[in-house]
Image (cartoon, rainbow, N blue to C red):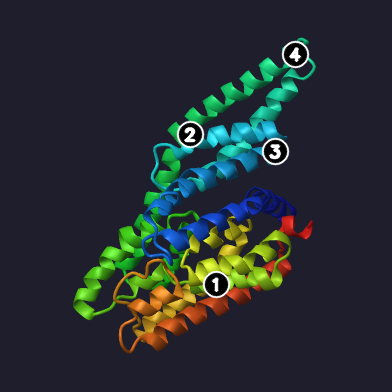
Amino acid sequence: MREKIQRFGSFLAAMIIPNIGAFIAWGLLTALFIPTGWLPNEKLAEMVGPMITYLLPILIGFTGGKVVHEWRGGVVGAAATMGVIVGTDVPMFIGAMVMGPLAGFLMKQFDKLVEDKIPSGFEMLINNFSAGILGLILAIVGHLLIGPVVLGLTNALGSGVQFLVDRRLLPLADIIIEPAKVLFLNNAINHGILGPIGVTQVEKAGRSVLFMLESNPGPGLGLLLAYWFAGKGMSKESAPGAIIIHFLGGIHEIYFPYVLAHPVMILALWAGGILADLWFVITGAGLVATPSPGSIFAYLAVIPKGQHFPVLMGILIAAVASFLVGSFILRVMPVKEDEEK
């Protein structure tokens, strides 16, 4: 069982790790040019949405197909991924991680079936049309089946967070929030669920802890520090740059691929998030508005008078807990892809 889990983790890493550079490019673009970024630029910010909606999922879909069946698998994987992207309003990374390998596998099976059976001179024609037809079929299947499933998952996670918030089980809400964030549902949860309730609490109490449940940069900082100090290969080398984009730029999405590549690292995020939320509840900490983007500087701008110690200590607690748990995991269960570098 352990060996199967390691192989599965290695396969996920092979899909995600090679595309870290593209995530960093998107993260830098976002941190710099969105309206709340360092150098707001409306024209350049137009690239932010298309990159996370189309480019990054398609890259993952292509890589997933390529891992299974080289370039032909990658091309069909990219085409199939487009099917799950269209018609949804959330980044389809999970859909891409399903459709890419599935496309590569089916293309590989077809090529085995027709191997040595194609008439001479018809190789290119059959190869191209078979890839095109399979890509079309999978794009339709993805659009009609996989996309709605992921959207259903989005709604279910949102309902789960709402349930815990309504019952004042705030620390436990992190059990849902962190996996939802990694699936790129962070904005939906933060601005669609936590933000509106937080605004109501501010009107009554002057501050709200709900603004910190999703936006706390501590867990992500600890996770990236763990990769920097205990990781290997590409993930270790790219972690310092990701830390700057995440903690100073406030772009949390930059650390999501590190978890998708090694899902057990969600335990590190849980450790940091739950302990920080427990601290926030005990000390009565809160912010006056949603920190956007979720950088340390945005936090400093919305901390009410007298709340700096509990808020900043909560971020520190999250970072330390996430770092310790993440470092332990990477020592005991290192990312397979990194070991081979």
Disc 3 from disc 4: Cα separation: 22 Å
Quarter location, residue 186: bottom left
Residue on which the image places disc 1: 221
* Residue type for callout 3: Val
Secondary structure state at the residue bearing disc 4: loop
Q: Residues within 10 Å of mark 3 (few under 14, many from 20)?
A: many
Judged from the image, the secondary structure of the residue bearing numbered disc 3 is: helix
SS category of the residue bearing label 1: helix
The residue labelled by disc 4 is 118
Q: Is residue 258 above or below residue 221?
A: above
Q: Which residue is identified by label 3?
A: 68
Where residue 44 appears, x then y in whole percent?
Answer: 43, 53
Q: In the image, what residue occupies the spot 54% across and 77% down?
A: 319
- Foreground residue among 173 and 144: 144
Mark earlier in primary sequence (2, 3): 3
- The alpha-carbon separation of the residues under discs 4 and 2 comes to 29 Å
Neighbour class for label 2 at 10 Å: few (<14), some, many (≥20)? Answer: many
